[in-house]
Amino acid sequence: MKTIPQKSLPRLKAFTLVELLIVIAIIGILAAMLLPVINVAEQHAKKTQAKLECGNIVNAIQQYESDYTRMPVSSIVQGSGADEVTFGGIFQSPGNNPYMVGSTNPVSGQVYTNNSDVIAILLDYTNFVNGWNANGWTDNTNFMKNPKHNLYMSNTHNSGWDPSKGGLPQPGIGNDLVYRDPWGNPYVITMDLDEDNYANDAFYGLASVSSSTGVANGPGLTGLTSHIDDGISSYSFHGSVMVWSAGPGGLVDTASSAIQGANKNHIISWQ
């Protein structure tokens, strides 16, 4: 009987250890090259989002003013006699020191260090979310600041972040009703209260920030102009509302101009 020899199948050549290491190294190099590109694209998207959110806040405040012929502020702020008010936050300086942005009530001495009062009114919240505040009530208690129950902003989201539980602040509106930018820092909101159509922000009103010469009365930067109000010279926006974000770095620097250093990364509504 004749035996037919079987043909052996060709053997697949396996990667050697050296070849495998080379492939892994190439993948690592490609990933390292792509990461900066991905990071730049991500930061650009966040800047675009912050710019849109700043504009949405401005539009919401202007619409509220049109409906109620007043600004969306608490009765305490309205009765303070202030010409302008800045709802700010606590930021870091380049030297890693905390710097507080916000107006001080001339009567009570209270510093407005977040925008929760404004957001509660614009979004018709009467209570803080999930009982965050022990008192529970906002400045819109019983809808007294928004009796028409209008929601002046859309496309916002609740982050669910609770400051009392720690962790990094999250973008969006937290349980404390503070509206934070894509990097987790509060939006700064300034409003003109005396109806002279000049808004003077607590940070951008400084000559060291907004004067092109660094001293009072020099030409203004970012579209702001030197303006004298009640005998005090500062840099103001010719309009009723200013909103800004500290940007990707989250830093503010009174020693640098608006177009230099940490400040040049800010996202502003008026330019």
Image (spheres, rainbow, N blue to C red):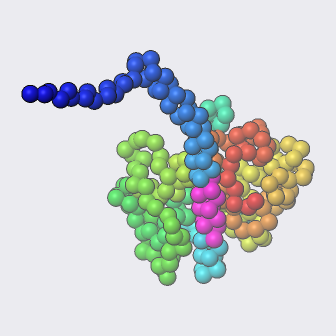
Q: Position of residue 240 (x, y in %)?
A: 72, 68
Residue 78 relative to residue 3: left or right: right
Residue 116 relative to residue 214: left or right: left
Residue 151 versus residue 22 in the image, above or below: below
Q: Farthest residue in the front direction?
A: 1
Residue 118 versus residue 69 in the image, above or below: above
Label tally? 0
Residue 37 relative to residue 3: left or right: right
Residue 1 relative to residue 264: left or right: left
Tell which of 22 and 202 is nearer to you: 22
The residue under the point 73% across, 45% down is 264
Tell me the quarter of the picture where residue 6 sits: top left
The residue under the point 49% across, 70% down is 123
Residue range corresponding to the magenta coloring: 47-59
Q: Position of residue 267 (x, y in %)?
A: 67, 53
Tell which of 20 and 238 is nearer to you: 20
Would you say residue 252 is visible in this rendering? yes
Would you say residue 185 is visible in this rendering? no
Tell me the quarter of the picture where residue 166 sits: top left
Q: Main secondary structure of the magenta part?
A: helix
Q: Position of residue 45 (x, y in %)?
A: 59, 53
Q: Farthest residue in the left direction?
A: 1
Q: Position of residue 53 (x, y in %)?
A: 59, 61
Q: Quadrant of the N terminus?
A: top left
Tell which of 239 and 222 is nearer to you: 222
Tell me the quarter of the picture where residue 98 sits: top right
Does residue 49 belong to the magenta stretch?
yes
The residue under the point 40% across, 65% down is 127
Tell which of 52 and 110 is nearer to you: 52
Residue 146 versus residue 266 in the image, above or below: below
